[in-house]
Image: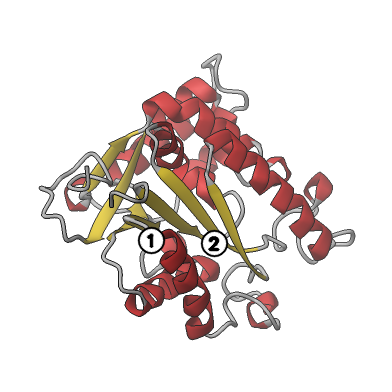
C-alpha cells in the first residue's frame, strides 16, 4: 500500500455508463487523491447516431457512432478527472434479443474467459483496492452489463488480489421519488423539459429495498460534474432523461450513489458511507 496510491476501478459496459452509475464517486475520489481507473468494455456502436438516428435506420453507421462515442467518453472522463481510461473495444451488443447480440466480435458473443483474461491483466497492473461493476442482472438486464459483471467476477478469480467489490444499485425510495418528479408538471424553473406522465408509469423495476443497500456515498458536491459528464455524451441525449431535470434537481435526486458490498476483507462496519472504509 505504501508504494502505490489507493485505487478505484469501475468496470462499465458502454460509453455514458460511467457517468450515470458512478460519475459521483469517480469525481469525488479523484478529488480526494485516489487513483481512478475506468474500464469501458464496448464501443457503443449500437447507440444513436447524429440527429438521433437509431440502429437499423437509414443513415446509422455503427463504425462512425463508435468513433463519436469514444470522443464523448474521453470528454466525460476529463470532466470527472478519471485518471486512467482503458478500452476493451468489444462491439456493442445492443439490447437483449437484437441480432447484434450474436454478431462476430460483440461483447455478448465473446467467451467470458477471453474478456476476463484481459480484465485480469488490467487488475494486475493497477492493483485496485475497490472494484465496482453491475450485479448478475446487469442492473436492468442489458446483455453487455451482464457480460461486464461476468468478466469482472471471473477476472477476480484469476488475480492474487483482495479488493473490496461492489455492485451498483439504487434504493427503492429513490425510484419512487424519481417517479414523483416525473409526474410533476415541469413548472420548476430548473427543469429544462417537462416529462410526460406516461414515462413515470413505465419506470423499470430496478434497485433494492433501502435496507438491503450496504453503502451510501454522498456525492452531492460533485452533482454538477456528474451532470456535465452525462451531457458530454450529447449524441445519446434522447436516451439520457436525467438531463431534462437541470443541474439543481439532478443533484438533489442523484447526489447519493448507492452500492451493495459483496466482497470485503477490511471488516468495515455496515452500512458504510465510503467505498474505501477500512482502507484509510
Query: Does any portion of residue 250 appear in the rendered image?
Result: no
Residue 77 vs 126, above or below: the answer is above
- Expressed as whole percent of the image width and height from the top left, the position of residue 92 reads 65, 67
- Seen from the viewer's position, the closer of residues 5 and 10 is 5
Identify the residue under disc 1.
127
- Residue at 48 percent of width and 20 percent of height: 248
Identify the residue under disc 2.
13
Q: Which badge, 1 or 2, comes first in the chain's sequence?
A: 2
- Cα separation, mark 1 vs mark 2, equals 20 Å
Q: In which quarter of the image is residue 238?
A: top right
Q: Is residue 53 left or right of residue 182?
A: right
- Expressed as whole percent of the image width and height from the top left, the position of residue 200 reads 47, 42
Kind of element beneath mark 2: loop
* Callout 1 crowding tier (Cα within 10 Å): few <14, some 14–19, many ≥20: many
- Seen from the viewer's position, the closer of residues 61 and 15 is 15
- Residue at 52 percent of width and 37 percent of height: 197
- Expressed as whole percent of the image width and height from the top left, the position of residue 141 reads 46, 66
- Seen from the viewer's position, the closer of residues 96 and 86 is 86
Residue that lies at the very extreme toward the right in this rendered image? 59
Query: Does any portion of residue 217 appear in the rendered image?
Result: yes
Kind of element beneath mark 1: loop
Amino acid at each position: 500500500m505504501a508504494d502505490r496510491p489507493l485505487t478505484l476501478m469501475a468496470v462499465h459496459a458502454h460509453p455514458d455508463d460511467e457517468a450515470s452509475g458512478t460519475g459521483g464517486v469517480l469525481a469525488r475520489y479523484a478529488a480526494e487523491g485516489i487513483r481512478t481507473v475506468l474500464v469501458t468494455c464496448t464501443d457503443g456502436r449500437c447507440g444513436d447516431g447524429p440527429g438521433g438516428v437509431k440502429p437499423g435506420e437509414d443513415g446509422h453507421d455503427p463504425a462512425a457512432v463508435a468513433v463519436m462515442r469514444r470522443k464523448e467518453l474521453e470528454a466525460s472522463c476529463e470532466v470527472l478527472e478519471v485518471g486512467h481510461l482503458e478500452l476493451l473495444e468489444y462491439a456493442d451488443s445492443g439490447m437483449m434479443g437484437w441480432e447484434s447480440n450474436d454478431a462476430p466480435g460483440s461483447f455478448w458473443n465473446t467467451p467470458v474467459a477471453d474478456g476476463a483474461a484481459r480484465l485480469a491483466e488490467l487488475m494486475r497492473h493497477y492493483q485496485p483496492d475497490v472494484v465496482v461493476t453491475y450485479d448478475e442482472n446487469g442492473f436492468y438486464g442489458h446483455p453487455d452489463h451482464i457480460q461486464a459483471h461476468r468478466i469482472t467476477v471471473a477476472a477476480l478469480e484469476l488475480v492474487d488480489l483482495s479488493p473490496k467489490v461492489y455492485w451498483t444499485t439504487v434504493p427503492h425510495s429513490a425510484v419512487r421519488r424519481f417517479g414523483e418528479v416525473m409526474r410533476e408538471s415541469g413548472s420548476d424553473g430548473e427543469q429544462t423539459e417537462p416529462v410526460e406522465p406516461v414515462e413515470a408509469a413505465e419506470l423499470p423495476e430496478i434497485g433494492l429495498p433501502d435496507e438491503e443497500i450496504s453503502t451510501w456515498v454522498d456525492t452531492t458536491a460533485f452533482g454538477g460534474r456528474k451532470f456535465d459528464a452525462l451531457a458530454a455524451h450529447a449524441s445519446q441525449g434522447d436516451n439520457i432523461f436525467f438531463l431534462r431535470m437541470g443541474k439543481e434537481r439532478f443533484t438533489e435526486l442523484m447526489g447519493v450513489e448507492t452500492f451493495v458490498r459483496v466482497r470485503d476483507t477490511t471488516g468495515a462496519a455496515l452500512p458504510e458511507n465510503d467505498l474505501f472504509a477500512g482502507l484509510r
